[in-house]
Image: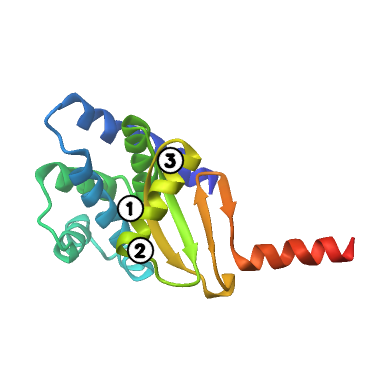
Amino acid sequence: MAELATIARPYAEALFKAVAVNPAADLSGISAWVDELAAIAGSAQLQQFADSPKTTIDQSFDLISGVAQTALPDAARNFLRMLIENGRLNVLPEIASQFRALKNVRGGSSDAVVYSAFPIEGAALADLATVLEKRFGRKLNLSVALEPELIGGVRVVVGDEVLDTSVKARLEQMKIALTA
């Protein structure tokens, strides 16, 4: 959604700049609480609660901070309160996404999603990460998503780049070659 991205950009950039000013700031720790708040704010039930005219800012804030698994630092609490006061709670997932992108640019890495028919863990994931980092030419933050319809192999999505070595893709290529 372009509109949410446009609204989220100044918040993500402001948060990133505020963090960048402090050289002792832990980008990974900040990214963790931003992602956690985004996951909470992404709940349809929470959105319905927060959007209710009967719900106060303090009630929304207390609910979200109470649901958070980790103790929120002051910066997180201030950021969350500001978003609630400005009626931008629904934009928090997009803010987290843009903040993660800014963090990746600074660190020279990219987020990558590996779609696989079967779970990939431990040494196999580390080996795959090494091969993919060499192929894409940068450090990758891998996450694995199961997609049984791939039959076998993997499909890797890094930004707008896709590497599809799945059995499903190969069968589609064979189908096209046979029908041409």
Q: Earlier in the sequence, mark 3 or mark 1?
A: 3
Mark 3 = which residue? 7
Q: Are marks 2 and 1 in contact (CB under 8 Å)?
A: yes
**Residue 90 visible in the shown view:** no
Which residue sits at x=22%, y=55%?
Answer: 57
Look at the numbered disc 3 and give the secondary structure of its residue.
helix
Q: Amino acid at mark 3?
A: Ile
The answer to which of marks 2 and 1 sits earlier in the sequence is 2
Residue 159: x %, y % from top left: 50, 44
At horizontal 68% and vertical 63% (from top left) the residue drawn is: 170
Residue on which disc 2 sits: 47
**Amino acid at circle 2:** Gln
- Which one is in front, 145 or 100? 145
Residue indicated by mark 1:
89
Between residues 32 and 86, which one lies in front from this camera angle? 32
Q: Quadrant of the C terminus?
A: bottom right
Residue 164 at x, y percent in the picture: 59, 56
Above or below 91: residue 119: below
Q: For residue 36, which numbered disc appears in the image?
A: none
Which residue is pictured at 10% across the width and 44% down the height? Answer: 74
| Element assignment for label 2 | helix
